[in-house]
Amino acid sequence: MTATVTTTPRGEAPLTLEEPAPRVLGWLDQLGLWGNLGVSLLAPAAAAFVLVPVTGRISFAAAAASVLVGTVIGALMIAAAAVAGAQTGAPAMVLMRGLFGRRLSYLPTAVNVLQLLGWTVFEIVVIASAAQQLFPWHAHRWPYVVIAGVLTGVMTVRPLGAVRVLRRYALAATVVATAYLFIELARHPKPSLTHGTWSGFWLATDVTIAVAVSWAPLAADYSRHSRSSRSAFGGALVGYTITQVAGYLLGLLAIATIVHQPTGDNRAMFAALMAAPVGSLAFGVLVFRELDESFADGYSAVVSLQNVWPRVDRRLLAVGMCGLATFGALVLNIDNYKNFLYLLGSVLVPLTAVFLVDYFGTRRGYTADVRAYAPPRPLMLLPWVLGFAAYQLINPGLIGWWARMWGHAGRWVHFTPATWMSASLMSFVVAAVATVPIVIATRKVPQA
């Protein structure tokens, strides 16, 4: 029998799932990672979706409050999922084996890979568009897309090395650049921040929850390298909350002072930020830092695929995934960003609820069942589906035929959503409550 030779660099993520995950990330590493992931070039432009949810424009004060509430809720989901990764040393989709069984775990794996591929495409397009505005050296966009895709692939091949670089350099530069832009925008005249309605508060909150919770299925991919579950939880909660709130507030401030038309257009927002004195330099920092978003999405997609093919070298998967995302960025239209966020939230919020209730309710202090022959648990699909349905009944999004279908379903069950209802919170509660009796009925004894 031929021995397997491992060429994984010391302190780097293993090449296959058959190798142990090194515990090399401390509190500052986790803080730097999630602090960088919390701020995005998409956030300032996406602030328009917070300020003008489906029901119409709300006040700036309501929008700011929704950003804070939604981010904290989403960051708590991320941090709780990070604890599971730190305790087990298993990546996120491998943890789904304990929730659904090995074969059924392929379903959330497929959903996760799809959303990560979509996010990677989004991020490469955003980086390329921002770089083209910052460095208008070429009339066509494709060179910027290719460069962003190649840099994303390089970081994906050395993920833990990239995390250390983010902690040492990128976070500090991002804080300085963001603070500078805040100061410059705050000097402009501002309208009344309290004028307007709060009636769309929870719809606006759902936008920020959806963005945050999209990272929950990724958390264990990085926290499995954490030295402790406490540092994984704290780093994710503190780092992500502070920077996502800052990113959205920066967008709201730009809309209140110099943009004025909250359309969600990235180019208009980028131009506004670069218009400040030395704004191009600060914006350039944010552009280069955005690579951590595309890298994190790409790497987690690779680790998710290893749940299906555990012996495949992740470097090969990284090249294929980043190549596909780069191709998608060249040919796809990403204008339907808002609907994409709502759809992600409706799938990921209840999935996160089911996993957390099952993990902490069934196996707290135990090792989750991540074996290749983990038994199937089809009943766990039921609360996930119920949570998804609850989300859609309250907020089916803006895709015409889809919204009409759920409108008919709501009338059939005599349900009319109230304006105070948050689709994300109701979805989470429904999925969590539906999971409890299944957990009690199937509670397992500690594994040896």
Image: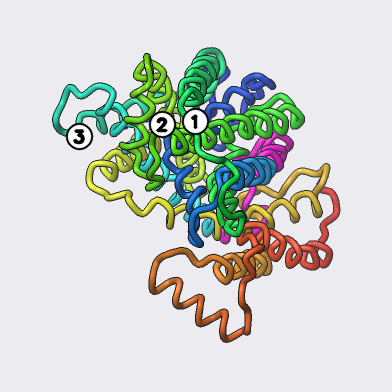
Q: Main secondary structure of the magenta part?
A: helix
| Residue located at (59% from left, 41% from top) | 64
Q: Amino acid at mark 1?
A: Leu
The kind of secondary structure element at disc 3 is: helix
Q: Quadrant of residue 101?
A: bottom right
Provide the residue designation for mark 3.
142
| Residue located at (49% from left, 58% from top) | 56
Q: Which mark is residue 329?
A: none
Give the residue furthest to the bottom.
Answer: 412
Provide the residue designation for mark 2.
315
Query: Which range is magenta?
Result: 77-105
Q: Amino acid at mark 2?
A: Arg
How many numbered marks have been drawn onto this rendered protein structure? 3
Q: Report how far apart the C-alphas of labels 2 and 1 lie in the structure.
A: 7 Å
Label 3 close to label 2 by CB (< 8 Å): no
Q: Amino acid at mark 3?
A: Trp
Label 2 close to label 1 by CB (< 8 Å): yes
Q: Report how far apart the C-alphas of labels 3 and 2 lie in the structure.
A: 24 Å
Provide the residue designation for mark 1.
15
**Who comes first in sequence, dot 1 or dot 3?**
1
Colouring style: rainbow
